[in-house]
Amino acid sequence: MTQPPGADPRPLTGEPLSIDLLNTRWIDGDGPHDLLDSLSGLTVWLDSPPVREHLGPGPAPTADRATLDRLLLARRALDALAATAVRHDPATPEDADRLNEVLAHGRIRRTLGPDGTPESVVEVDEPSWRPAWYAAENWLRLAVDRPDRIRPCANDACVLHFHDVSKNGTRRWCSMAGCGNRAKAQRHYARRSGA
């Protein structure tokens, strides 16, 4: 199915920001894809509703080389951390350092507003760090909440990840419509053919 120009072509969107960043790479019948292999792909990602929602108010990040390079740095860090999470291993110092390198370029400033309401403001060294910093910070939130719910798709040919928010925590597939149905069809064929 062809996508309209500027449409997000990824098969899985709507995951938390850190996982959404991981899912900028996918494999389909046409082979491997990487949404972040160009500035136009970066524009698509930055304009996607999950990203806009997570980045909150403020000016939209610029789809430039600096923003892309910093996002790729964050994605490499998240790739390594996702691999250790799958094995239920703690992060290695090197993996932690990669994520901390991104996190070092931003901070949350907490203040008490004039009306007595607590306020939190994210500050980054440069605007181009904002998407990468938010993705790294989102990973920390997921890792504190339920690290065991950060999972890769059970389809060995799929490279997508998801955050399992199902009640019983047994989700296995990036999507039942895609990988889940293929697995069911393969099991059905194996039973019918006696394999």
Image (cartoon, helix red, strand yellow):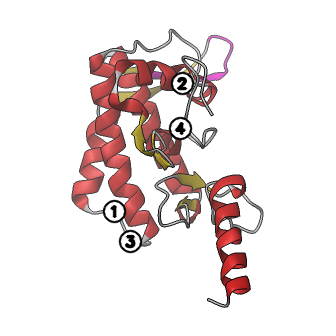
Bounds of the magenta segment: 114-122
**Residue at the far right in the pictured view:** 167
Secondary structure type for disc 3: loop
Give percent across and percent down for residue 114. 62, 10
Q: Helix, strand or loop at disc 2?
A: helix
Question: Quick check: marks 1 and 3 in contact, CB under 8 Å?
Answer: yes
For marks 4 and 1 on the same chain, the one whose residue lies earlier in the sequence: 4
Relative height, residue 86 to residue 73 (above, below): below
Asked if marks 4 and 2 touch (Cβ < 8 Å), the reply is yes
Q: Position of residue 146 (x, y in %)?
A: 58, 60
According to the image, label 3 marks what residue? 89
Distance from disc 4 to disc 2, alpha carbons, whole Å, reads 9 Å
Say whether residue 171 is magenta. no
Mark 3 crowd level (few <14, some 14–19, many ≥20, 10 Å Cα): few
Q: Who's the residue at 55% across and 32% down the image? A: 9
Using the image, determine if residue 48 lies above or below residue 127.
below
Q: Locate the N terminus and report the quarter of the image it occupies.
A: top right
Q: Neighbour class for label 4 at 10 Å: few (<14), some, many (≥20)?
A: many
- Residue highlighted by disc 4: 17
Say what amino acid the circle numbered 3 marks: Asp
State which tag comes first along the sequence, 3 or 2: 2
- Residue that badge 1 annotates: 91
Amino acid type for the residue under numbered disc 2: Leu
The reply to whether residue 61 is in sight is yes
Disc sitting over residue 55 in the figure = 2
Amino acid type, callout 1:
Ala
